[in-house]
Image: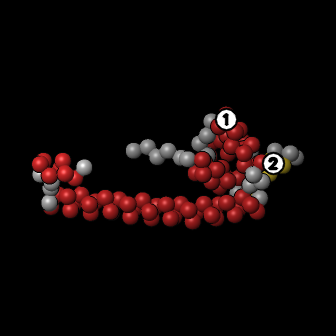
Amino acid sequence: MVNYRDRLDIIADILNVVSREAKKTQIMYQANLSYKVLQRYLTEIIDAALITFQDANQIYLLTGKGHQYLNAYKEYARCSKSMEKRLTDFTTKRKVLENLCPAKPSELQYAK
């Protein structure tokens, strides 16, 4: 199964790379993004003041706000995984109940 990253995941991936100071190509490869997609996100992240660009060394640096984003994202990701596990457990338990007492075809029309 392929896990697709959403906008928040991609931003966190970029910020994780930038937290170690990085050039554009490093970010592109380590965050697994195309050049075009990276450009769009870098613009957005710089505008949001999560990172800065240092012209002298051609590197991107994480700001205090960027650190704040990463910390909040880690908590969000932890909660999200916990919620996904609980939902999977809930779905499994529901299937067990349905298998223990399957609906008869004649009863299905009344359940609608």
Residue 24 visible to the viewer: yes
Q: What is the basis of the colouring in this image?
A: secondary structure
Query: Is 34 on the left or on the right of 66, as rendered?
Result: left
The mark that comes first in sequence, 1 or 2, is 1
Per the model, the C-alpha gap separating discs 1 and 2 is 17 Å
Q: Residue at x 59, y 42 (%)?
A: 32
Task: Name the foreground residue: 66 vs 86.
Answer: 86
Q: Provide the secondary structure element on which disc 2 rests.
A: strand
Q: Provide the secondary structure element on which disc 1 rests.
A: helix
Q: Residue at x 33, y 63 (%)?
A: 89
Task: Name the foreground residue: 112 vs 102.
Answer: 112
Of the residues shown, which amino acid type is indicated by label 2? Phe
Residue 35: mark:
1
Q: Mark 2 points at which residue?
A: 53
Going by the picture, which residue comes out furthest to the top? 36
Q: Which residue is drawn at 46% across and 46% down?
A: 3
Q: Residues within 10 Å of mark 1 (few under 14, many from 20)?
A: some
Q: Residue at x 67, y 34 (%)?
A: 36
Residue 70 location in percent, x, y? 65, 60
Query: Is 99 on the left or on the right of 29, as rendered?
Result: left
Task: Name the foreground residue: 42 vs 56.
Answer: 42
Label 2 near label 1: C-beta < 8 Å?
no
Going by the picture, which residue comes out furthest to the front? 110
Query: Is 49 on the left or on the right of 108, as rendered?
Result: right
Image quadrant in which you'd find residue 62 = bottom right
Residue 106 location in percent, x, y? 11, 48
Residue 55: mark:
none
Residue 101 location in percent, x, y? 14, 60
Residue 67 location in percent, x, y? 70, 62
